[in-house]
Amino acid sequence: MGQRPSKLFDEEIMNNFTDLSCGQIQYICQQTNLIDKEVSRRHREFLKFIRDGRMTKEQLTEYLQNIWPNGNVLNFSDYLFDLW
């Protein structure tokens, strides 16, 4: 008993928040021409830097622009933020 949630509870919330669904991975693959394994790899790399997976739309757009300097990532970041 206590006022703070258990570590297990926090980890469950974190995992649900940072996991990509199959539909999300499929959409990302269609929009980027990446294969699902590459999307998953990049997602894991992203979570190393942004552990809780939370960032502003502007931070995400900047992050994606560094990954795809010649790409138009604004629509993609809009899509990701519209999911939530």
Image: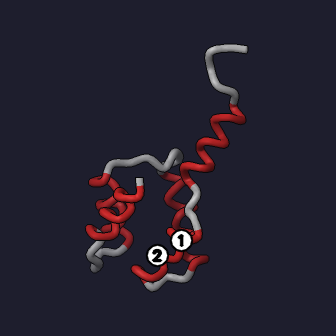
Residue nearest the viewer, comparing 68 with 84: 84
Residue nearest the viewer, comparing 23 with 32: 23
Which percent across, then down, holds residue 25? 53, 72
Left or right of 62, for residue 67: right
Residue at point 73%, 14% (across, down): 1
- Residue type at tag 2: Tyr
Left or right of 55, for residue 23: right
- Asked if residue 33 is positioned above or below residue 10 in the image, the reply reads below
Q: Which mark is residue 67?
A: none
Left or right of 61, for residue 7: right
Residue at point 49%, 82% (across, down): 34
Which percent across, then down, holds residue 73? 30, 71
Which percent across, then down, holds residue 8? 72, 35
Q: Quadrant of residue 81?
A: bottom left
Q: Are dots 1 and 2 in contact, CB under 8 Å?
A: yes
Please tell me how crowded label 1 is: few (under 14), some (14-19), or many (20+) other residues with Cα within 10 Å: few
Please tell me how crowded label 2 is: few (under 14), some (14-19), or many (20+) other residues with Cα within 10 Å: some
Q: Which mark is residue 23?
A: 1
